[in-house]
Image (cartoon, grey):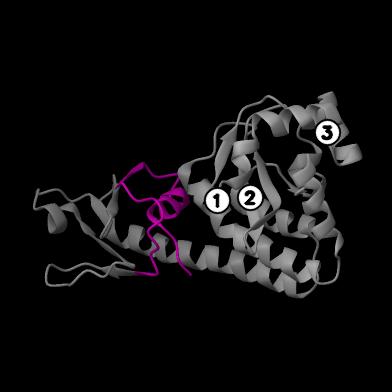
Amino acid sequence: MQLNLHIIQEYFKELHSEVISKHHDTAISEIRLYSDHMTMKTDTGYIGASDLFFHDGQSDIICMCKTGYIHFYSADLLYIFNRILEAFSYYARWMDTCKEAIDSGCTLTNLLEITENVLSYPMIIVDASQFMIGFSPKALNYSDSAEWKQLLHTKSIASQTLRQFNLLYRDSFKKRHCFHLPADFFPSPSCCQHIFVQDERMATLIVVEDEKPLSMGKQKLMELFTPCLSNWLQINMAADNSFHGTSFFAKTL
């Protein structure tokens, strides 16, 4: 299981902390208690008092990797260390649960139901023709707006609205990372992540930002979830050629 500084910080949302890093995607595979004679590995996070790293006389705990660090405003080393180990276990169980569900023939809605416990936001998945193919439980009760009710009932938005959307946001279809969309076509802003299969955009995960914008940690969790969705699509594409048809249809919009 590989996390990064922002995902680890997300797990500590009840404790004030700050990420100091220019590289958001550095993968951390394991955690070690730090001592000053250690040679730091790129894929390892090191935990210790600030004074060990910066010789500043401070006892606040730091989680350091070669590209940045988290500054925890706490001096409780044992608590921070154990909670980080707990974070690795928690997200590994989430990924294992998703994999087991896919292997047992689950639907995309089943995957979103599992993941809603992690992201805590309403979610939907649309295919390449922007037809809804999965939704989380929170999405059902999200909004009373006519547009949202139509989406849930017909699985798509009005064709004229869809044409306007594709014209305005056509440049977003090639993005490989999370990106935000304003509330132009949905009741609230959203954070989106495309799912590619063999370099072709086959679907999009849409997280509805119903309360506040997604944190960087939750965006990185979306990206961590994307390979599960890609795996599901590849398995189901083998049994359902309609995915290729909808993808072709999307190119004509």
**Disc with the residue nearer the chain's start (3 vs 1):** 3
CA distance for labels 3 and 1: 24 Å
Q: Is residue 129 visible?
A: no
Query: Amino acid type of disc 2?
Result: His
Residue drawn at x 31%, y 62% is 78
Q: Magenta part of the protein: which range?
A: 1-30
Q: Which mark is residue 157?
A: 3
Secondary structure beneath label 2:
strand
Please indicate whether residue 231 sits to the left or right of residue 155 in the image: left
In the picture of the structure, the residue carrying the numbered disc 1 is 176
User: Does 217 lie within the magenta span?
Assistant: no
Q: Quadrant of residue 8?
A: bottom left
Residue drawn at x 76%, y 71% is 235
Residue drawn at x 85%, y 31% is 159
CA distance for labels 1 and 2: 7 Å
Q: Is residue 54 above or below residue 17?
A: below
Query: Amino acid type of disc 3?
Result: Ile
Query: Amino acid type of disc 1?
Result: Arg
